Amino acid sequence: MSKEKIGLFGALKSSLEDVEKFYEGKITLKNYERSVSKPHKYTSEEIAELRKRLKISQAIFANLCNVSTRTVQSWEQGIRIPTGATLRLLEIFDVNPGIINQQGLL
């Protein structure tokens, strides 16, 4: 068995042993804080290009983003900018366009 396989097996075995100890009340599990990068701030041009690349209408795009069609129009015209969770959703659509089919369904 290769060192890589042994290392992976060892890590898996250790993790399972920790789970067993946790359920026996012998240890508490540690909380790990994972650093997550902030989502990309899309420009009006990038939003319009993304929607067109996805081959969906503004209405379907709005539905997927849970906003009004007017909001999508405002984004694409540069009047408003998306914030918060919407930015992360745009990033998901950008990185994984296959998540949306031609009817705009996830």
Image: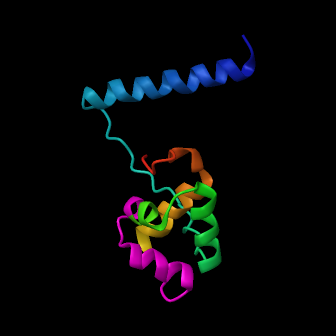
Measuring from the top left, give residue 38's x and y in whole percent. 54, 69
Q: Residue at x 43, y 72 (%)?
A: 84
**Which coloring applies here?**
rainbow
Please name whichever residue, 20 or 81, is drawn nearer the observer in this view of the structure: 81
Please name whichever residue, 50 or 42, is drawn nearer the observer in this view of the structure: 50
**How many numbered marks appear?**
0
Q: Is residue 82 within the magenta segment?
A: yes
The answer to whether residue 81 is seen in the rendering is no
Q: Is residue 78 above or below residue 42?
A: below
Q: Residue at x 36, y 70 (%)?
A: 67
Please name whichever residue, 46 or 20, is drawn nearer the observer in this view of the structure: 46
Q: Is residue 13 within the magenta segment?
A: no
Which quadrant of the view contains residue 63? bottom left
Measuring from the top left, give residue 82's x and y in whole percent. 47, 77
The residue positioned farthest toward the bottom in the image shown: 79
Q: Residue at x 36, y 28 (%)?
A: 19
Please name whichever residue, 89 or 77, is drawn nearer the observer in this view of the structure: 77
Q: Residue at x 49, y 26 (%)?
A: 14
The answer to whether residue 32 is seen in the rendering is yes
Quarter of the rendering occupied by the N terminus = top right
99 to the left or right of 31 = right
Measuring from the top left, give residue 64's x and y in whole percent. 41, 59
The residue positioned farthest toward the top in the image shown: 1
Q: Is residue 34 above or below residue 13?
A: below
Measuring from the top left, give residue 57's x and y in whole percent. 49, 62
Q: Which residues are magenta?
A: 63-83
95 to the left or right of 84 = right
